[in-house]
Amino acid sequence: LPTPPTTAPSVCSAYDEDHPALAQIHDVHVHKLVQQIIAERLQDDTDESAFFAADLSAVYQAVLEWRASPIGKRVEPFYATKCNPSDPVLHLLSLLGLSFDCASAAEINQVLALPSAPSPDRIIFANPCKPASFIRTAAQKGVSMMTFDNADELYKIKRIYPSAKLVIRILTDDSKSLCRLGLKFGAPLDTCPGLLRLARQLGLDVIGVSFHVGSGCKDPMQFADAIWRSRKAFDMGKEAGFDFTLLDIGGGFERETFAQMAEVLSDSFDLYFPESTGVRIIAEPGRFFVSSAFTLATNIIASRRAQQEAATASVAASAAEKEDKENSTADVMYYINDGVYGSFNCIMFDHQIVHPHPLTIDGDLTDTPPPFPPLPNVAVDVDLPVQMGYSSVEKASVWGPTCDSIDCVRQLVDLPRGMSVGDWIGWGEMGAYTLCAASTFNGFERSPIHWTTGGDSPDAKVVRQILDNFASTSLR
Ligand code: PLP
């Protein structure tokens, strides 16, 4: 049998029961944490439930990467809370001095209830179409910075929170992004003069311009185009009698293309918003900070080698519109205990392609950790088991646990031979838009999170120090 776990979480009782996740954070490498939990499960044989392992040092590293980039000194990140609203993530980011993009009253309340709650001016209410009651909450809490993109929103804000600091969200090209937010939000440039005139007539205070190039942006040049449009909107603001001081460049950043995006942005700032203009620039990154910090461990709860052809064909038909080359048949069907109604909702809502790696084979823990940093989530042909050196693989389809046939996690993917019921499959890059939108459909629980600072690495030690210093100096 594998060795039982040796690392207990460091219990920091200063973080009270209002923030239980903060009270129990391990200090171990994330892969070790996954292995220890599984080893314990294998030994007891009483619990096969899926779980996340979250590595706060990966969040910290992403913050360092942002700050070291060509835009790091100029652009203040307001973390997009919606992307992963877990207390430890929010708390660490707040302690690191980040601000927040909230899209609802509940998100505002959550961020302001953190032990390290930021001041309300470190929040932007970045939802251009808000329910009146949410605007009331923002007013009560003093969260004054908020976006709009239509006339009705201006009338609503005039009625409820006339002293709000408004940011006009403009429409930009998002055609190369996985999630095209422009289908729903953003004022086309030719409507901006009218909206700004109306804001002026209503006596509202518009302080700047925002945009979002779409989540999962694949083309850095979309940012160049958006900055050019923002310049136009600034000029329109001048004509309407405003003196804009804020540019909000939204989210859409991914680790794989970040360096290019930062270069493009830096050049565009020099061209259209040089430092000498004194314009404050903020951003709303979500995915960038959390994606690689979360690994999901799932258990094979059932499998079958018969009838898979018919089933695979029926899913292929129902997902025909997907741009998907996975069109041959699987040797084996695996059923795991999290699916598209749970953490893998990212497949439906966020167009993610997820990549499995074996955590156990035939009941034995695998030694090889998955490659870190993990791989881009878009390439269908990136199958980790082969990259990890497993030469004997077979084609598998991987299914979630519900009774719905749409609950398919991968239609066809390489997994090592020899896996069977009871074995564990890991999934990296699972921090963005996963647990936040998971349901309990069919009675399947959401997968809980086990937290770690990341272990012995220097970054992990800094994270531990930051958390403990705050607890000892600022909490009772
Ligand atoms: N800001 C707004 C207004 C959004 O709608 C989103 C995502 O939907 C984000 C920021 C975060 O985007 P991303 O996670 O791609 O950085």
Image (tube, rainbow, N blue to C red):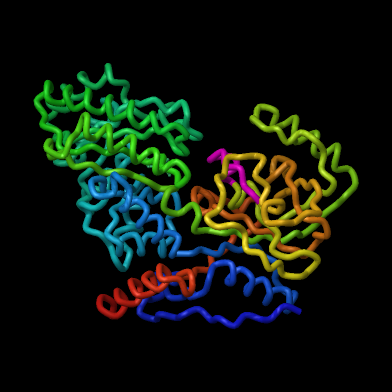
- Report whether 331 appears left or right of 381: right
Q: Quadrant of residue 407?
A: top right
Identify whether 369 is placed above or below 265: below
Q: Is residue 133 visible?
A: no
Report if residue 353 lies within the magenta region. yes
Foreground pick, 50 / 253: 253
Please, which residue is most extreme toward the top here? 190
In the figure, is residue 375 to the left or right of 27?
right
Return the residue nearer the eye: 343 or 67: 67
- State the image coordinates of residue 305 (x, y, percent, origin top left): 88, 49
- Residue 167 image position (x, y, % from top left): 23, 35
What residue lies at 51% left-to-right and 63% top-to-bottom?
Answer: 54
Residue at horizontal 65 percent and vertical 58 percent from the top: 426
Q: Which residues are magenta?
A: 345-355
Tell me the quarter of the image containing the C terminus: bottom left
Q: Residue at x 81, y 66 (%)?
A: 362
Any part of residue 335 in sight: yes
Q: How many marks?
A: 0
Ligand 1 lies in quarter:
top left
In the image, residue 49 above or below residue 144: below
Where residue 299 appears, as percent x and y from the top left, is: 71, 61
Q: Is residue 369 left or right of residue 283?
A: right
In this picture, residue 420 sits left or right of residue 187: right
Q: Is residue 432 above or below residue 198?
A: below
Where residue 257 sits: x, y (%)?
45, 41
Residue pushed farthest right? 306
Q: Which quarter shows the N terminus? A: bottom right
Q: Residue at x 68, y 46 (%)?
A: 409
Tell me, yes or no, whether the highlighted magenta stretch contains residue 185: no
